[in-house]
C-alpha cells in the first residue's frame, strides 16, 4: 500500500539481564549505522573496563533519528538507556514517518501550510515518545534487575518537507533531558551547543546565582584552579543531573525545538563522557579535521578514552563515551522507503488477471471479518471474560480488517492502473490547469491558473501550486474533468460500436480532426481496423471514464484509510496487551511477597507457641522438684514431656524450634531480595 505494510516484531518475555542484552545487540546491529560507544573505565587512570556500557547511540539516516542515551550508573542505567532508544525508534521511525506522509497529503488536499502543521505534530509526537519511554521503564521496575533505572536523552529527528516553492527544506527537531549534548557546526562557523543541560550548574543560572557567561567559563575551564575564586564553589558538582527518563517527570517543561539545516551542516551528539572531558574547541577540532562522519566519531571517542586512561587531568573521568556525527546531505530523509519500489508496469491483460484473483479471494476475507466481529461482540457481552482475551480477539479483528482493506485497495488500484493505460494522465509537470475552488463564496473555477508540480501514479493524484505558493493535492480524475475544452489525447483507448452494433474495446486515437472528431485504429493479429467517432461522443465517453475513475479512487482511498486505522489500532492493542502482561507480572510479584509475609508471620506464631509449651514444661518440672505439683499438674507435665522430648521419629521441641528459626531466616532473606 502507499504507506507500506509494517512488519511487527515479536515481543519476547525476557528471562534475564543477559538475554535482554543479547536480544538488544542483535536488534541494534540491524538499525544502527556507525560505531558503538566506548565502554568506560571503572576509574579514571585504570585500564580495567566496566562490565556493561550504559551508553547507547542510534544513527539511522533513512528514518532521520539520531540520539545518544547515557544510563545513570548508580541506578542500573544500562536498561533505561537501551529501552528509551528502542522506544524512540519504534515511535519516531516508520510509525511517525507514515503519519507525516498522511498529514502532508491531507494538508495539500485541504490547501493548508504543511510545514506548520507537521512541525507541530512532530514536536507533540517527540514529547509523547519520551513519556512512553518513561512509562515503560517504570512498568518494568517490578523486575529487580530493572528497578530504579534512568537515563539521559539527546534526541534529534530530521525530516524533509516541501518549502512551497517547488523545493524542499531539511528540518531538524531536537530535545534534551539530562546532560548529554547536541551541537551543530555550520559550514565555516564555530561549533554551537543547541541543547540545554538539566544540571545543578544550569539550575544556579536559572535561579540567578550566576550568569550564563560564568556558567560557560566553569564548564569550559581545564581545571577549577583557573577560575575566579568566586566561581570555584559552583564548579563542584556542576554535572549532577536534575532530570532523567525513568525518574521524576521528564516531560515537565520539556522543550522540542527545530532548526533548518543546509547541506554540509554537521549534527554532533555526545554523552558527558565526551563533553565533561573535552573542551568545545577540542570537539570542534575533532569534527572539522577528519574526512568523514565515522572518522569524526572515532576521533572524539579516542581522544576522550585517552584522557580517561591517562587519568591525571582535572577533567578526566572513567565514564562511558559516545559521539555521534551526521553531515546534512543535499536533501533530508524523504521517507522514500515507505513507497514501494517501482516495478515493471503490468500489462492490461496481467492487471485483469490480478483483478480476477483478488475478486476470488475477497469473499473469504469478508467472511473472516464477519466471524471475528461476531466473536468480539460475544466477548463484549460476557462480563466474565478476562480483558486479555478481549484484547486478543480485537487484535484478531483488526488484523482481519487490515487484510481485507489491503485486498480492496489493490483491487481498486488495479482497476485504476488499467484506466491509466487506457486514458493516460492529461498533464505533465509544469502544465497550467484550472482548479475548482469549494472555498469560494460561490464555488467555481479559480481565475488564476495553477501549475502542476507532480503526478503520483500510485495515489492517482496531482500536486498543484497556485498564487502565493499554496499547494494542493487533487485527484487526477476530479482535476481533469474540470478543465475546459476537449479531453481527448492521441493514444487514448476508446470503445467503438462495430458494424454489427456491438461495443468493441481496444481502439486507439491516432488523429483528431478540426471538428474534434477522432480517427481510431485497432490492430489484432496483423489486421488493422479503423473507425471514426464524433467529438461530442468522445468527450462524453471520456467524462464517463473520469467519473468512474473518481469513484474507484475514492474506494481506494477509503480502503487505504481503513488499513491505516486498523494498523494503528493493532499497534495500540498490542501495547495495551503488553502493559497488561507487565501489570499481571507485577501483581504476581506482589502476591508472592504477600504470601511470604503471611508465611513469616505464621512461622513466628508457631515459634512463640512452641516456646510457650517449652516454658510451661520447664515450670511444671520445677514445681515437681519442690513438691508443689498436684494431680492435674502431673498429668499435664507428662503430656508435655512427650511433646518436649519427642520420640524415635519425632524431633524434640527444641529441635523443632531451631528448624522453624532457620526456615524463618531463609524466608526473610528471600523477602529482602
Image (spheres, helix red, strand yellow):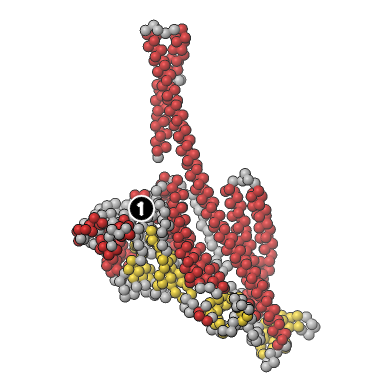
Residue 345 horizontal side relative to residue 657, left or right: right
Circle 1: is it few (<14), some (14-19), or many (20+) Cα within 10 Å?
Answer: many
Check the image and name the residue furthest to the bottom: 514
Q: Residue at x 65, y 80 (%)?
A: 481
At x 66%, y 88%, the residue is 510
609 left or right, relative to 535 = left
- Where is residue 605 drawn, in percent x and y? 44, 26
Q: Which SS class for mark 1?
A: loop
Q: Looking at the image, which residue sits at the far right?
A: 500
Q: Residue at x 42, y 75 (%)?
A: 330
Which residue corresponds to mark 1?
72
Q: Nearer the viewer, residue 640 or 361?
A: 640
The quarter of the picture where the N terminus appears is bottom right
Residue 216 visible at all? no
Taking depth in this image into account, of 447 and 322 the one nearest to the observer is 447
Q: State left or right for residue 367 relative to residue 320.
A: right
Query: Which image quadrant for residue 573?
Result: bottom right
642 over 472 or under it: above or below: above
The x, y position of residue 217, in whole percent, is: 25, 63
Between 562 and 665, the one lying in front of the other is 562
Residue 578 percent coordinates (x, y): 52, 51
Amino acid at each position: 500500500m502507499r504507506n507500506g505494510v509494517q512488519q511487527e516484531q515479536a515481543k519476547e518475555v525476557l528471562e534475564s539481564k543477559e538475554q535482554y542484552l543479547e536480544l538488544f545487540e542483535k536488534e541494534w546491529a540491524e538499525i544502527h549505522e556507525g560505531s558503538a560507544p566506548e565502554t568506560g573505565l571503572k576509574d579514571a587512570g585504570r585500564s580495567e573496563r566496566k562490565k556493561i556500557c550504559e551508553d547507547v547511540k542510534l544513527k539511522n539516516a533513512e528514518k532521520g533519528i539520531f540520539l545518544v542515551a547515557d544510563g545513570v550508573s548508580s541506578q542500573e542505567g544500562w536498561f533505561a538507556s537501551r529501552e528509551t532508544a528502542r522506544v524512540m525508534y519504534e515511535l519516531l521511525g516508520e510509525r511517525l514517518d507514515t503519519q507525516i506522509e498522511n498529514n502532508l497529503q491531507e494538508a495539500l488536499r485541504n490547501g493548508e501550510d504543511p510545514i506548520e502543521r507537521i512541525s507541530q505534530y512532530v514536536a507533540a509526537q517527540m514529547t509523547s515518545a519520551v513519556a512512553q519511554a518513561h512509562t515503560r521503564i517504570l512498568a518494568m521496575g517490578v523486575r529487580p534487575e530493572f528497578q530504579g533505572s534512568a537515563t539521559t536523552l539527546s534526541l534529534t529527528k530530521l525530516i524533509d518537507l516541501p518549502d512551497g516553492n517547488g523545493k524542499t527544506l531539511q528540518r531538524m527537531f531536537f530535545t534534551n533531558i539530562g546532560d548529554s549534548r547536541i551541537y551543530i557546526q555550520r559550514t565555516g562557523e564555530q561549533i554551537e551547543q543547541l541543547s540545554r543541560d538539566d544540571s545543578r550548574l544550569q539550575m544556579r543560572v536559572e535561579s540567578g546565582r550566576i550568569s550564563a557567561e560564568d556558567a560557560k567559563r566553569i564548564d569550559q575551564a581545564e581545571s577549577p584552579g583557573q577560575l575566579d575564586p568566586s566561581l570555584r564553589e559552583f564548579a563542584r558538582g556542576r554535572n549532577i543531573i536534575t532530570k532523567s527518563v525513568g525518574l521524576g517527570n521528564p516531560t515537565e517543561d520539556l522543550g522540542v525545538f527545530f532548526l533548518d539545516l543546509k547541506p554540509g551542516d554537521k549534527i554532533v551528539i555526545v554523552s558527558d563522557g565526551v563533553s565533561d572531558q573535552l573542551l568545545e574547541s577540542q570537539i570542534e577540532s575533532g569534527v572539522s579535521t577528519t574526512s568523514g562522519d565515522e572518522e569524526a566519531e572515532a576521533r572524539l571517542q579516542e581522544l576522550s578514552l585517552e584522557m580517561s586512561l591517562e587519568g591525571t587531568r582535572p577533567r578526566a573521568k572513567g565514564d562511558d563515551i559516545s559521539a555521534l556525527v551526521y553531515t546534512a546531505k543535499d536533501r533530508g530523509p524523504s521517507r522514500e522507503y515507505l513507497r514501494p519500489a517501482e516495478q515493471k508496469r503490468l500489462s492490461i491483460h496481467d492487471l485483469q488477471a490480478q483483478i480476477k484473483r483478488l475478486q476470488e479471494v475477497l469473499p473469504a476475507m469478508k467472511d473472516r471479518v464477519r466471524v471475528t466481529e461476531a466473536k468480539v461482540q460475544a466477548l463484549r457481552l460476557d462480563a466474565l471474560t478476562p480483558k486479555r482475551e478481549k484484547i486478543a480477539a480485537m487484535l484478531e479483528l483488526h488484523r482481519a480488517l487490515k487484510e481485507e482493506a489491503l485486498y480492496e485497495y489493490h483491487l481498486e488500484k488495479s482497476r485504476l492502473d488499467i484506466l491509466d493505460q487506457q486514458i493516460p494522465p492529461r498533464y505533465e509537470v509544469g502544465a497550467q490547469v484550472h482548479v475548482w475552488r469549494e472555498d469560494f463564496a460561490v464555488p467555481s473555477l479559480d481565475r488564476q491558473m495553477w501549475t502542476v508540480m507532480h503526478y503520483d501514479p500510485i495515489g492517482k493524484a496531482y500536486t498543484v501550486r497556485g498564487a502565493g505558493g499554496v499547494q494542493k493535492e487533487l485527484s487526477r480524475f476530479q482535476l481533469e474533468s474540470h478543465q475546459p475544452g476537449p479531453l481527448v489525447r492521441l493514444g487514448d483507448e476508446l470503445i467503438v460500436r462495430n458494424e454489427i452494433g456491438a461495443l468493441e474495446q481496444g481502439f486507439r486515437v491516432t488523429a483528431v480532426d478540426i471538428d474534434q472528431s477522432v480517427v481510431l485504429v485497432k490492430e489484432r493479429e496483423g489486421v488493422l481496423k479503423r473507425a471514426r467517432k464524433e467529438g461530442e461522443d468522445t468527450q462524453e465517453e471520456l467524462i464517463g471514464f473520469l467519473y468512474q475513475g473518481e469513484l474507484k479512487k475514492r474506494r481506494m482511498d477509503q480502503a487505504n484509510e481503513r488499513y491505516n486505522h486498523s494498523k494503528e489500532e493493532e499497534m495500540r492493542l498490542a501495547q495495551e496487551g503488553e502493559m497488561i502482561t507487565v501489570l499481571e507480572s507485577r501483581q504476581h510479584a506482589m502476591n508472592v511477597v504477600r504470601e511470604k509475609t503471611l508465611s513469616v508471620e505464621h512461622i513466628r506464631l508457631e515459634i512463640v507457641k512452641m516456646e510457650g509449651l517449652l516454658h510451661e514444661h520447664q515450670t511444671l518440672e520445677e514445681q515437681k522438684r519442690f513438691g508443689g505439683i498436684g494431680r492435674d499438674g502431673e498429668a499435664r507435665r507428662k503430656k508435655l514431656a512427650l511433646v518436649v522430648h519427642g520420640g524415635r521419629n519425632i524431633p524434640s521441641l527444641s529441635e523443632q524450634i531451631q528448624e522453624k528459626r532457620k526456615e524463618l531466616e531463609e524466608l526473610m532473606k528471600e523477602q529482602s531480595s
